[in-house]
Image (cartoon, rainbow, N blue to C red):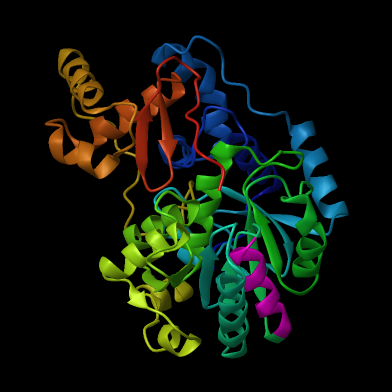
């Protein structure tokens, strides 16, 4: 099991994770490159100038981090850093795993065998009844139920799980900003007997752009995702796509073809998701993740000066290209990027430069505020430096 981080490095990782302009993948690259978060923070001013960033990068101060840590402790919560033994191993397997989680409740639940139940906010009474029944029956069978604490299906799944077992809520804002407001009591009940997890700092209002990141946490914590009453354009389908991209099982409850609220979930069945009418359909098709046992036994972070980056993830490698060759590689990468999200793997396949050069270029572009790292190991070109993409609130 990996050793606890020294206090100074623990605080530095929180500062780096909380720095505007540093996404989850850039966090990994920076710590790999400089051997520690402290080293990365010291290098940030020079890196930002080198990347041509118009404004400096400002990590929060040590004092600000300590204040947030104290406020979180006063709520009964704690931070969990990527690389700590307590960090959920299935979530750590994501390329863009959150560097930092804030957790209320039982942290150990995040590493237990879990299934997500998600769906529409405007679910029918039957949809909510099905979600509640699935949550109760799957929790009774020993699974942790993960959902997003939204209105409709999410809240019903949580309530069902609370009646018979344990549940985890992943939320888009800070832990002190329950959303929607009418679910504040439900969030408190989940924190008391399960766990509530947030990537955002305390005090963060749940804005539209935060929800896709919350959705990847839901998908990352679970071995499979059950979708109940999802429209064709819904946050639940984002969760399903992220789950599928990371090798998790997909389940969908069939609905009326006349109801647009069911078109997305019905389409998942058409694409190969397991048709789900009861908990038995989930239990029969939810094997352990292929890597789960290994992930449970092996520390999430490799030993060394930059713990936290699981095998077989390579350490930072300086690109062999330099000068004109690196400049040409940068132009090639920029040509492949656009405002629509592009998978980093697709860029690697189509760019003639080395993987190390592409990683270095993407890091520079993010530090410059030219691209944004998005859930699912994807990047998107920003129209102007610092401009954030907008996503519809689920």
Residues in magenta? Answer: 152-163
Q: Can you see residue 286? A: yes
Could you say which quadrant of the image residue 346 lies in?
A: top left
Q: Please tell me which residue lies in front, 180 or 29.
A: 180
Left or right? Give the position of 353 relative to 287.
Answer: left
Q: Please tell me which residue lies in front, 221 or 295.
A: 221
x and y, in percent, of residue 366 in the image: 42, 26
Left or right? Give the position of 37 relative to 104.
Answer: left
x and y, in percent, of residue 272 in the image: 26, 70
Q: Can you see residue 247? A: no
The residue lying at 53 percent from left, 70 percent from top is 117
The residue lying at 63 percent from left, 52 percent from top is 5
The residue lying at 58 percent from left, 63 percent from top is 123
Q: Please tell me which residue lies in front, 323 or 137.
A: 137
The quadrant the N terminus occupies is bottom right
* Magenta stretch prevailing secondary structure: helix
Could you say which quadrant of the image residue 144 lies in?
A: bottom right
Above or below, comparing residue 89 to residue 342 in the picture = below
x and y, in percent, of residue 101 in the image: 63, 52
Q: Answer whether residue 344 is magenta in the image.
A: no
Above or below, comparing residue 225 to residue 149 in the picture = below
Q: Please tell me which residue lies in front, 2 or 260.
A: 260
Left or right? Give the position of 78 relative to 233.
Answer: right
x and y, in percent, of residue 353 in the image: 15, 30
Q: Answer whether residue 156 is magenta in the image.
A: yes
Q: In the current view of this chain or complex, which residue is farthest to the right?
A: 74
Above or below, comparing residue 321 to residue 73 in the picture = above
Could you say which quadrant of the image residue 155 lies in?
A: bottom right
Above or below, comparing residue 247 to residue 371 in the picture = below
């Amino acid at each position: 099991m990996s050793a606890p981080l020294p206090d100074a490095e623990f605080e530095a990782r929180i500062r780096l994770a909380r720095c505007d302009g540093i996404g989850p993948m850039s966090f990994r690259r920076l710590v790999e490159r400089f051997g520690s978060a402290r080293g990365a923070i010291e290098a940030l001013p020079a890196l930002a100038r080198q990347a041509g960033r118009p404004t400096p990068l400002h990590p929060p101060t040590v004092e600000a981090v300590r204040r947030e840590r104290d406020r979180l402790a006063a709520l009964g919560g704690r931070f969990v850093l990527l690389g700590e033994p307590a960090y959920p191993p299935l979530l750590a397997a994501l390329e863009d795993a959150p560097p930092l989680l804030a957790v209320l409740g039982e942290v150990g639940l995040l590493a237990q065998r879990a299934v997500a139940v998600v769906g529409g906010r405007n679910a029918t009474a039957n949809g909510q009844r099905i979600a509640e029944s699935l949550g109760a029956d799957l929790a009774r069978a020993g699974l942790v139920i993960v959902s997003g604490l939204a209105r409709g299906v999410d809240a019903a799944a949580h309530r069902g799980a609370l009646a018979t077992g344990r549940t985890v809520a992943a939320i888009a804002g800070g832990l002190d900003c329950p959303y929607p407001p009418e679910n504040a009591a439900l969030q408190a009940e989940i924190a008391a007997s399960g766990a509530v997890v947030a990537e955002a700092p305390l005090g963060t209002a749940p804005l539209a752009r935060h929800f896709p990141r919350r959705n990847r946490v839901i998908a990352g914590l679970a071995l499979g995702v059950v979708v109940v009453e999802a429209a064709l354009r819904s946050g639940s389908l984002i969760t399903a796509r992220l789950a599928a991209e990371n090798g998790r099982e997909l389940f969908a409850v069939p609905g009326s073809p006349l109801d647009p609220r069911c078109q997305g979930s019905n389409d998942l069945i058409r694409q190969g998701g397991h048709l789900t009418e009861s908990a038995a359909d989930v239990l029969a098709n939810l094997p352990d993740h292929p890597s789960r046992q290994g992930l449970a036994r092996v520390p999430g972070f490799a030993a060394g000066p930059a713990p936290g980056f699981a095998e077989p993830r390579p350490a930072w490698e300086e690109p062999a290209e330099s000068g004109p060759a690196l400049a040409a590689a940068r132009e090639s990468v920029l040509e492949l990027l656009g405002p629509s999200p592009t998978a980093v793997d697709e860029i690697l396949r189509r760019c003639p430069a080395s993987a190390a050069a592409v990683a270095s270029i993407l890091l520079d572009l993010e530090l410059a505020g030219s691209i944004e790292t998005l859930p699912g190991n994807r990047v998107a070109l920003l129209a102007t430096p610092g401009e954030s993409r907008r996503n519809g609130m689920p």
